[in-house]
Image: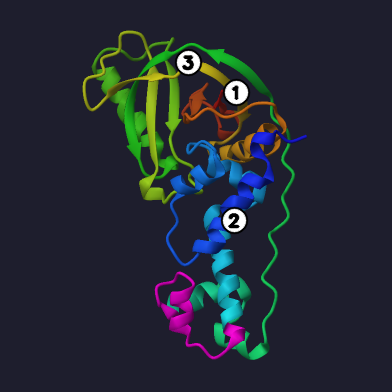
Amino acid sequence: MRHPEYNEARFAKVLQHLHQHYPHDIDLARLADIACLSPCHWHRIYRAVLGETIFETLKRIRLHHAARLLLDGNKPLPDIARACGYGGNAQSFARIFRDAYGMSPQDYRSRGGVPYPALPPENPTAAYPVEIRDITALPVVALPHHGDYMGIGASFSQLETLLTLRGHLPAPQARYFGIYYDDPAGCPSAQLRAAAAVALDGADATPPLQAQTLAAGRYAVLEHRGAYAELHRAYDWLYRDWLLNSPYQLADAPCLEEYLNDWQQVPPQELRTNIYLPLI
């Protein structure tokens, strides 16, 4: 039985808002407020419940209204594009419409319409081990990272170089964490925010490094084994299959990843990563 925190009524309110405001730009924080869910996690939950991102939903709604306008009369394409949130850019609208329906808007109008493609079926994902842990506050030295999360390795390299030059590394007790503030499916790659971090007693946090603290609290901890490029599957399973059927609610704090071994010393299939999901 799904936790009532994640019932469909919350997302029905979001969908109603999208249907009422589809011609306009959307504000993810506003939608999180409508859903009464943590801004840190709500888009991942939405994707888990609905099977698509907010932007995919908005695209589908816009194209649905555009298709109706195409069949209702002879309104020019720039007017339809403008009415459906594409700013009067008929070329951009026509390209997006063709990608979705497999034909141009003009052909759609002349043929009297075709159904919008259904969402692809979900591929079942194997279960992962999850533990509930109460974690004490953990001081870390961090280097902020901006941009594609798959590029955070460069930030870790810079962090390690600085700490080595300052005489703190190598250290067998060092623990390596990634702090991820945004959902990559709900934020442009260039705007993603993260931090590469090391837990190491007495480390010098002189800029560009920063002293931060990983928050104390309860976490669901999932261990993933395999390449970093496959971590998204573990996140999807954690939100869709574990969280929605658990008795827990999410805290308004970012997800953490702890890297338990070194990608430079083991093959990708042997990498071990703990994902920390903050709970109330």
Instruction: Indicate the secondary structure of the residue bearing disc 2.
Output: helix
Find residue 86 and report its horizontal and vertical position in percent: 44, 71
- Mark 1 touching mark 3, by CB under 8 A? no
Residue 219 position in % (x across, y down) = 57, 21
Name the residue nearer the viewer: 94 or 262: 94
Tag 1: residue type? Val
- Residue ID at (57%, 89%): 73
Q: Is residue 192 above or below residue 82?
A: above
Amino acid type at image mark 3: Ala
Query: Residue 40 at x, y = what percent?
Result: 48, 36
Residue labelled with disc 2? 15
Front in this rendered view, residue 240 or 267:
240
Which residue in the protein does label 3 denote? 216
81 falls in the magenta region: yes
The answer to which of 234 and 10 lies nearer the viewer is 10
Residue on which the image places disc 1 = 221
- Disc 1 to disc 3, how far (Cα)? 14 Å
Category of crowding for the residue at label 3, using alpha-carbon neighbours closer than 10 angstroms: few (below 14), some (14–19), many (at least 20): few
Few, some or many residues within 10 Å of mark 2 (<14, 14–19, 20+): some
